[in-house]
Amino acid sequence: MIEKVYGLAGMKMGMFGKGGSGKSTVTTLLARTLAARGYEVTILDADSTNVGLHRALGIDRPPAPLTDYFGGVVFRGGQVSCPVDDPTRLPNAVIRWDTLPDTYYARTPNGIHYLIAGKIGDQGPGAGCDGPVAKIARDVTIGGPPDRAVMLVDFKAGFEDSARGAITSLDWAVVVVDPTNAAIQMAADMQHMVAQIQAGELPATDHLASPKMVELANAIFRDASIQGVLFVLNRVASQQMEDYLRSALDEHGLRALGVIHTDPAIAMAWLTGSALDSEPAYREIQSVIDELERSVVRHD
Ligand SMILES: Nc1ncnc2c1ncn2[C@@H]1O[C@H](COP(=O)(O)OP(=O)(O)OP(=O)(O)O)[C@@H](O)[C@H]1O
Ligand SMILES: [Mg+2]
């Protein structure tokens, strides 16, 4: 009997992309399909603003945020600081399912664990900084043997979290590219930034007072585990669009793992707050995962 190889086992992968490109859609499609293939999937919802990912996964009630579990945000006197001001590691950031109180996670029938890093909507005036969410996204890992475990981090839109260093602890970044020029540019920028990190470029630290803090910030980037950036096309409406996107990426030396076409059922699911059911998209994500497993080969 041939034993199945879980090529993504032990990986932490982050979803990036411009606003509305489809990060949460692709996260949901990947999570449910990876779970169906036998992976033990954890989603870390690290979007500090948008709510509703739990519904796309078929979860009724969102769990309590990890900002509470880790002692509250620094702006209210808690433990969870902002990684830009405070490069220290989040203490006790390894999560174990047998000890994490069940208010802090939800579990779908197909076994996906869902965690929320934190939302700033409920923090009140003066505490509206999502640095602590980025810090949790950077530092949280799941304890236990990797076996078939894979973690997907759904980031908020744009570049900020990756620039804050949340990208350093990932194994791979996945950029979701929608049919816009801005998305193509962001894909190229992300590739460039990861190349800079891999070439040993250190973070901006002029704002940090002590040499010890500067050293800590540098160490985070020096020890970065990020191996590369991968690309998924989403909300593609025609062959012409797909061809254009592929050749535009190609001009930057980038290649997409696959494509998710426009499906009105996806938009309806997000509109009505229901579980994301789109037969074509789940079919398309299968070949994205095949490509992902081929691309992601550990070098250590
Ligand atoms: N393949 C698709 N087909 C049809 N509609 C889609 C598709 N992907 C995404 N959408 C639409 O785009 C919207 C944004 O998608 P999604 O929430 O996944 O993006 P996001 O990148 O996570 O957004 P945000 O930046 O706000 O977090 C959805 O509400 C949905 O209406
Ligand atoms: Mg989203």
Image (cartoon, rainbow, N blue to C red):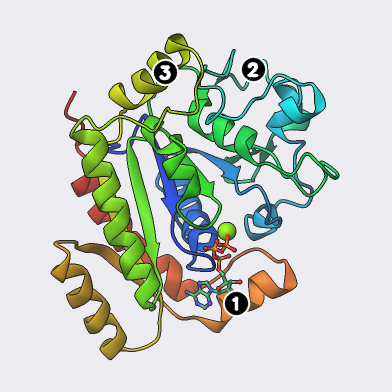
Q: Quadrant of the C terminus?
A: top left
Cα distance in 3D space between marks 1 and 3: 45 Å
- Which of the 4 quarters of the picture holds residue 51? bottom right
Q: Which residue is mark 3?
A: 214
Cα distance in 3D space between marks 3 and 2: 36 Å
**What x and y, as percent, mark residue 264?**
56, 83
Which numbered mark, 2 or 1, is in the foreground of this view? 1
Which numbered mark, 3 or 2, is in the foreground of this view? 3
Can residue 73 be seen at all in this image of the molecule?
no
**What x and y, as percent, mark residue 185?**
32, 66
Badge 1 vs badge 3, beta-carbon distance below 8 Å: no
Name the residue: 30% across, 35% down. Answer: 226
**What x and y, as percent, mark residue 174?**
36, 52
Crowd rating for badge 3 (residues with CA inside 10 Å; few <14, some 14–19, many 20+): some
**Which residue in the rendered view is the most extreme toward the top?**
212
Crowd rating for badge 2 (residues with CA inside 10 Å; few <14, some 14–19, many 20+): few
